[in-house]
Image (spheres, coloured by chain):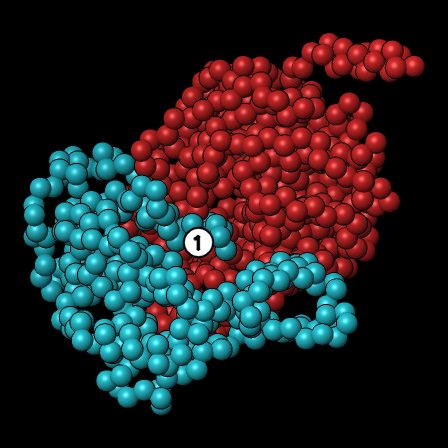
Amino acid sequence: MVNRRLFQVFLAVGFAAVSSVSLTAAVAATRADEITEARNPLTSAADVAAGAKTFRSHCASCHGLNGEGGRGPNLASGVFFHGSSDPDLLKNISDGIPGTEMPGLFYSPDRVWQVVAFIRSLNAGKKTIQASDVARGALLFNNKSCRQCHRVNGEGGRLGPDLSDIGRIRSVEHLRAALIDPNADVRQRYWVVSFRDAYGKSQEGFLMNEDSYTIQFIDMNERLHSASKSGLRDYTVEKTSKMPSFKDSLSSSELEQLVAYLSSLRPKGGAQ
Amino acid sequence: MKRIRIAAAAAVVLSWVAGPLCAEVTYERLLNAEQDPGNWLTYSGNYRSWRHSPLSQITRDNASRLKVKWVYQMQTTHMVETTPLVADGVMYFTEPPSNVVAVDATTGRQFWRYRRVMPKKVNVCCGQVNRGVAILGDRVFVGTVDAHLVALDARTGAVLWDVAVADYRTGHSITVAPLIVKDMVICGISGGEYGIRGFLDAYDIATGKRRWRFWTIPAPGEPGSQSWPGDSWKTGGGPTWVTGSFDPEQNLIIWGTGNPSPDWNGDSRKGDNLYSDSAIALDADSGRLKWYFQHVPHDVHDWDSVQVPVLVDDEFQGRRRKLIYWAHRNAFYYVLDRETGQFLLGKPFATQTWAKGLDEKGRPIRLPNIDPSPEGTYVWPGVQGATNWYSPSYSPLTKLLYLAVWENRSVYRKGEQEYSPGNRYIGSVPLIDLPDDPGHGAIRALNPKTGDRLWEYKLQTKPWAGVLSTAGQLVFGGSDEGHFFALDATSGREVWRQNLGGIIRTNPISYQSQGKQVIAIAAGNSIFTFELAD
């Protein structure tokens, strides 16, 4: 039994399970909220492997197979909104996070510690972002006209995604791939709609919403439109990105600098 | 003149106030629900599950005059999947997770509200939803997501009895609307994503004592057990989460069962995995299996047989037969003989890429390379199927079967997963929404004797709403976009449409109030009712 949006919930709620008191007495005696260790006691390679297996089954549907983010936040950055300590992670995975779609996972604390170990491994060995790279990347962002379409902290265009907190929701790998091959993952919101109205006048813009009878979009001059499909002479929806590839227009070091800048973008007042 | 008008208005109000509203729904009334079109007494409108209203006041010619009668906003943030019942002027519906509300069917004003206090954590695969109540006598029955069955006083909402059907801490839950059969409440179970062992239960109306239980997964030594290796039967799934039908002449309860567990990895359960993904026919008094028909032997795509079985007596291939019409999640439309379970006809009603066809016994002839794989396998239909739990409708006037259809595919991923009580047991996770290929939906009319499509009303998105046909030659349906619409039952032409502003994820009904036909549907977190403007 699984039901598109219903199943989306399934993907999230699939984490949810029964009250911890339901399990064995042994488990009951070691509930996550009774754990007082300051650090994860299970961090061996075997623990990481076991945690990866659990993660794939229960977490990957929202957080991505490698924690790169998706419906849920990027977990590969080593920075978390609701507490970054080991006990914070144990609690949030075990109990869920109230007010969010993150439900609790009902395994023994040992099993959850292994998931924590895997999540920690996602960030292990990664280079620390250098402030100098971020600064150079910010210059590139401006010089390469990214700002014409992308907004950061209230400045820039509105045609592409607002990038003010892109470093929270997308991994370094995802950002790098998006710059090299923008067409690899074009979300529906950024499909391009073109049509002619009843008078033959052409319009083009980015799709914002569509149902069986109407279409909503933002045109290239950032004006909002809503049109009845029955009043259109024709229309097409292109699923390719308007963003150019930077594969050949940036050196490898420039690419990394731009990624560093994007990865540094977090909500103001933001993450712990 | 003005005085006369006021007096007339007062008379109307007085007569409205004076009429006592109290449900006394006898079993005989349920048996003859088609002769009682002013009410909607069971989940599907009648035991044959036609979801058809004999009311004919609203027609193709006047449906453009439909207007909102009243709206009831629920106190919930959960998804609403309830189908209301209406009995003698009172509407009963569930408010998710497992509350029950009774309102005046004329005004929408609340009489009572039963609020179910839930444990801190309850494990339901697809949201803490509920699809409705059952009613008999002066009692209302509801299943809860913490796996209890509760009897309420229809006049006050007071709890009369409350029994644990199963342990919610092991992934059991109840989302199905129960079905009354004689003096029993028939109640199914959810938990196919948690490795439950499925069953269908019957409970005594008066006491809540269990009369019988049919295990949908047989234990060793029982017929069908050879289709489960080792201990896999213990966690074999086969839930019963959508309301079935009842054939009083044969004393048969006909119900659909859900997927085997784990969903997308069948390595631990090699075999047909009876009676998952099957139509089962049970003797109503004993719960014994009379026959079964398995739509998807050894399912690895989560294609439950939880569609509502539509029971029709009609000529078929030269002789009069008791038939079942069944458009399945696996994209095939089936006709079965209701007396024996014999397969009579099967034909795709939506795009499918997994089977060459069905053999003479209705068993699918699978194509190669369609099973889930670690790297992912693209298959039509998607994991939500070509249709699902939302109800079809059969009109005895047009003799057509109407249903909501999805045209979509999924990438099915296989993975390892061991069983642990209360946690998901699905064998990896398929990617459901393909961002560059969201698919689309439709309302389709089929000739149920051939499976041929008569017409289609195309939708941009895939609908989660069932359909209702009426004697006014209309078909009502809804969409994920929040549109509720009426179509010409013979052509599929749209004759009326209203944006309700919220996803429609349930089934329409019709009843009569103060001499006027009413159409009711839940959208977003509200119940909407419509009638013709004067």
* Spot occupied by residue A42 in the image (x, y as percentages of width and height): 9, 55
Q: In the rendered picture of this protein, how many numbered marks are placed on residues?
A: 1
Q: Is residue A33 visible?
A: yes
In the figure, what tint was chain B given? red
The correct choice, above or below, for B216 with respect to B107 in the image is below
Q: Is residue A259 visible?
A: no
* Spot occupied by residue B528 in the image (x, y as percentages of width and height): 64, 35
Q: Residue at x 54, y 38 (%)?
A: B525
**What residue type is disc 1 on?**
Gln
- Dot 1 falls on a residue whose secondary structure is helix
The correct choice, above or below, for B329 with respect to B507 in the image is below
Q: Residue at x 40, y 32 (%)?
A: B147
| Pick the front one: B262 or B57 | B57
* Spot occupied by residue B496 in the image (x, y as percentages of width and height): 76, 47
Q: Residue at x 28, y 61 (%)?
A: A266
The cyan chain is A
| Pick the front one: A178 or A224 | A224
Q: Which residue is mark 1?
A: A8
Dot 1, how many residues are within 10 Å of its Cα: few (below 14), some (14-19), or many (20+)?
many
* Spot occupied by residue B270 in the image (x, y as percentages of width and height): 38, 60
